[in-house]
Image: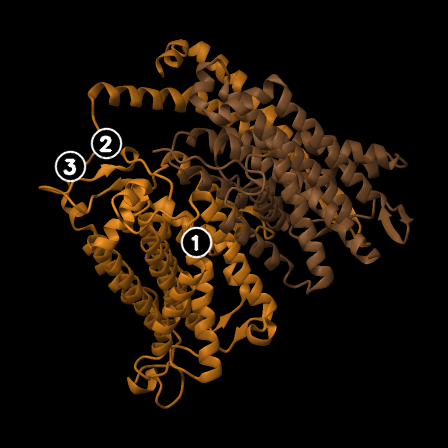
Amino acid sequence: MEYFIQQLLNGLTLGSIYGLIAIGYTMVYGIVGMINFAHGDVFMLGGFAALIVYLVLTSIFIGLPVAVILLIMMVVAMLVVSLWNWVIERVAYRPLRGSFRLAPLITAIGMSIVLSNFIQVAQGPRNKPIPALVRDVYTVAGISVSLKQILILVITAVLLAVFWYIVKFTALGRAQRATEQDRKMAALLGINVDRTISITFIMGAALAAVAGTMYLMYYGVASFTDGFTPGVKAFTAAVLGGIGSLPGAVLGGVMIGLIESLWSAYFTIAYKDVATFAILAFVLIFKPTGILGRPEVEKV
Amino acid sequence: MSNATIVTGKTSSGLVRRGLIEAFFAALISFGMFVLYIGLKTDQNIHNELIIVQRWGLLAIFVAIAAIGRFAVIVFLRPHLDERKLSKARSGELEISTDKTFLQKHFLKFALILMILYPMIVVGIVGAQGSLLYVDNFGIQILIYVMLAWGLNIVVGLAGLLDLGYVAFYAVGAYSYALLSTHFGLSFWLLLPLSGIFAALWGVILGFPVLRLRGDYLAIVTLAFGEIIRLVLINWTDVTQGTFGISGVPKATLFGIKFDASADGFAKIFHLPMSSAYYKIFLFYLILALCMLTAYVTIRLRRMPIGRAWEALREDEIACRSLGINTVTTKLTAFATGAMFGGFAGSFFAARQGFVSPESFVFLESAVILAIVVLGGMGSLTGIAIAAVVMVGGTEILRELDFLKAVFGPDFTPELYRMLLFGLAMVIVMLFKPRGFVGSRSPTAFLKESKSVSGSFTKEGHG
């Protein structure tokens, strides 16, 4: 039982990270209807930004408290990565918005290749390990809970609440939902559609940067190939939860994280990704709109 | 729409001022983007700790390029483009070509003759040993991608089903050949069709449950299946030997004649000096023949009811269903046919390399093949072939650019920039030609004469 709860906790932590990335996918897919393939690599950029900020801080200001370091890492990563995603949207996606369906998908795949190879060229192909930032581990009733797990869970919960509030109750959120439903009508009613879409990309990137920072903190290593697998899994999470739905993305992420950790705990670790993808296929075949998704209305 | 910008930019001093402002912002943005990634580099010191290396000069170059580039676009490029667009609109010229020059009419014949003569020309110029590079790295490599892209074109270009896991069928073909030939000693010519059949079978098995899905959901499930097959290949070590791969895969033979130094080898029989170039040239013609087969089948199928059903499905699935076309079987045949050609290409790949490992079948390969299909112009065989030559050939050239080392110093490795440039090329081509190199649609059924229409006039439904 303790082992089970321990695995549950690990899965929940991993799932929170996937969930944060998945929000970016789901928001972008909801508003412009494209799979933003570069989002996984945007997450990877976030991890690298955090890594570099960490190294700069620890080499210049020695003895800075860890909480401050983490906060600065996160904020700088959010800013830099948001800027990147804003530029990517402007350059690679916006000119193709009226074009046919596959065009932005191809530029997104191209951007994904560009980003990972850019980091490979600019920062070197080797894995970048850093010493553990947060070491505290508490033991409660035989279950060990590390402080970094608590941090990840709390940050995810807070960010989800904030973003859910923004989308649900602010003018910006209304503009986003209106643009999602009918872009032309939203524009006619005075919503700046371009700006709304840009802000959506920025929000997605900011969350991906937080996820990247936490991934770095959790695993203590960054690599230019980090974008692909978490990216695909996060997209899987977004689809699983029902694309376009914010709580769905986090729910999907948590489910993927749980499947992964429980599968590796009780079956073979080798096939954990196979299990994830197989479950995705099953869910889509039997419930194509995901768990919390709205049914797709077919118009003629 | 462009009127307003032209009026404001009429005075050249105003234009320059705007250019300067935009250049300043571009510099600011690029500084923000690159300050961490270019300005600072993480490196390992001798204690294996990460340290920061500062590269402010490089960062300054990046920022300067961004600013100057932006300035040039605002001041020179954009007014020029606007003017051209305006004059085109005034003259009422439409982008539909009606008259064709002699070269355009017979382009395909010339291209085919050139392809058949290509190895001979290369051998004639650089000799048998020197031809290895051109025949193998350029010829065969490009033709494999042409074949894969033409195979995927049936699924994506004709039937309009977005398949992101095409490389799985390539892998099935390659592993079918590698396993059956190493374990049972079956010959290439028997296994070539067999690999195709296996791949088609997998196409049906994977396709059957997922083809009820539409559009992007189909894309993500095919991606998942592609990953599952790769992960199984990695982890099922008893059969596939995991990441080590299967080595010593037998080579293909020419009607039983082997390409080796033995007494009944190709070189001895024809009294030629021993060279590995013959095998490569043989492989070149083999893949060329396979490509031609793919093209022939595609062209013939397009004229058959099933091909027309595919294209109808691509344009409008709902209309298709209401006209009584069985969409499930139509999609399945497209999936299976595409998979079959992937399987052929896979078994050829295994015979050529003599080695297969899961490394060759990553998602990136699927993405590259799909990119070639879309960049070429979906459905257009010529366009796809051109895209394969440009994209694959272009990146292969980067492997050979050793003279750049003289310019940028000995540490410069052009191979590193191969995929970076490939990705950039994907983005740039899409931005300027969203419909691909050959963005026209030629109808299969017509009243008097076939007229190509620009792809922009067609509207695709959800596939």
Q: Earlier in the sequence, mark 2 or mark 1?
A: 2
Image height of B307 relative to A170, above or below: below
Task: Measure how far apart labels 3 and 2 are at the Cα level.
Answer: 10 Å
Q: Quadrant of residue A166?
A: top right
Q: Quadrant of residue B304?
A: bottom left
Task: Say what amino acid the circle numbered 3 marks.
Answer: Thr
Specify the label residue B397 is tagged with: 1
Identify the colour of chain A in the image.
brown
For disc 3, the marked residue is B98
Residue type, numbered disc 1: Ile
| Secondary element at tag 3 | loop
C-beta proximity under 8 Å, tags 2 and 1: no
Mark 3 crowdedness (10 Å alpha carbons): few <14, some 14-19, many ≥20 = few
Q: Looking at the picture, does residue B27 appear above or below residue A207?
A: above
Number of other residues with Cα within 10 Å of mark 2, as a class: few under 14, some 14 to 19, many 20 or more: few
As drawn, the residue found furthest toward the left would be B448
Closer to us: B229 or B171: B229
Chain letter matching colour orange: B
Q: Which of the numbered marks, if any, corresponds to residue B95? A: 2
Taking depth in this image into account, of B167 and B284 the one nearest to the observer is: B167
Q: Chain of mark 1?
A: B
Q: Is residue A125 above or below residue B356?
A: above
Left or right? Give the position of B400 relative to A140.
Answer: left
x%, y% of residue B115? 27, 60
Rendered location of residue A59, percent (x, y): 83, 39
Disc with the residue nearer the chain's start (1 vs 3): 3
Give the vertical position of B7 relative to B220 (above or below): above
For the question of whether residue B4 can be seen, the reply is yes
